[in-house]
Amino acid sequence: MSIITISRGTLSGGKLLAECLSGRLGYRSIDRDVLVQRAATPRVSQRELQSALEQPPTFPGRFNHKRYIYLAMIQAALLEEVRTGRAIYHGLAGHLLLRGVPGLLRLRIIAPMEFRIRMAQDRLKLSASAAVRHIEKMDQERRQWTQFLYEIDWGDPAHYHLVINLEEITIGQACLLVISLLEQGGFELTPERQTVVNDLALASRVRAELAVNPFTSNLEVVVKASGGSVSVRGDLFEQSEEVQRVALAVPGVTELTVEELAPASLA
């Protein structure tokens, strides 16, 4: 069993590839809507989370802290969804949200503009010119989003194990290509890797709980976990007691270390 992420431009065939792989491998296919539904709370709506994943930053300040909160929630939801393997996430920057997950198969799929225009006309009922404008706008926002959050070029092939171009390859052929790669080994979720994923999932749950709790939602912290032992560090503004209370209430946390740091020390 493995965990697969598919990065793609707007209407580039990522969903079609995920559906094909899901059908052939028996893996769960997960998209952004699934994550938003899972991550939403009474305090943070699905609409707010959806916007955080779609819209690039426009100005600094409080808005960027809200983005920190939303992404903490989304990352925790994604790690929970893929934690046991046999999962495919096709959506924006899945491989970045799952940084640190060992054995993650990172795919990127690209397609000629003609293919993407046809997809837009079929799915969105747009004219050819409107389809081009829509695709270019969405791609630009995704580039800005990943550049702002991770300071990387979203399209750089170095971030992926395999880049598939649908110019001369069908979805069916791409699907078989990925399955063949999996069969050769190297991307299995071994017991050792499972331990790492479990730790990442626990750390992300603690970070998300701190982000949404009204007594700690103003903080931005670094959280790490090893087994049930969790460490939280950051500029806590004398809120260490609240941090301890919230973090220790997260299922799976058996031991907690809280370290107060100046903002410049966070890494």
Image (cartoon, rainbow, N blue to C red):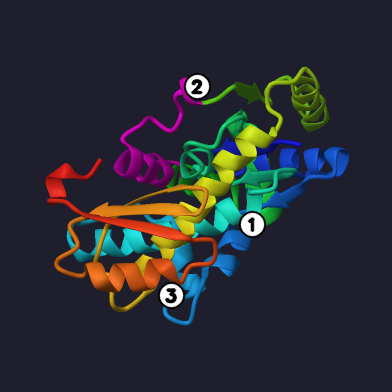
Which secondary structure is most common in the magenta stretch?
helix
Direction from residue 214 to residue 35 in the image, left or right: right
Q: Secondary structure at mark 2?
A: helix
Cα–Cα gap, marks 1 and 3: 28 Å
First of labels 2, 1 by sequence position = 1
Q: Position of residue 189 (x, y in %)?
A: 69, 35
User: In the image, which disc is placed on residue 124?
Assistant: 1
> Label 1: how many residues lie within 10 Å, few (<14), some (14-19) or many (20+)?
few
The answer to whether 184 is drawn above or below residue 231 in the figure is: above
Judging depth in this view, the residue of 160 and 206 nearest the camera is: 206
The residue that mark 2 highlights is 157
Q: Secondary structure at mark 3?
A: loop
Q: Is residue 63 visible?
A: yes
Judging depth in this view, the residue of 169 and 27 nearest the camera is: 27
Q: Position of residue 12 (x, y in %)?
A: 62, 38
Magenta span contains residue 146: yes
Task: Give the residue at x 62% y 22%.
Answer: 162
The residue that mark 3 highlights is 44
> Label 2: how many residues lie within 10 Å, few (<14), some (14-19) or many (20+)?
few
Judging depth in this view, the residue of 31 and 127 nearest the camera is: 31
Q: Quadrant of the N terminus?
A: top right
Task: Give the residue at x 81% y 40%.
Answer: 20
**Discs 3/2, front:** 3
Q: Secondary structure at mark 1?
A: helix
Q: Position of residue 201 (x, y in %)?
A: 53, 52
Cα–Cα gap, marks 3 and 2: 34 Å
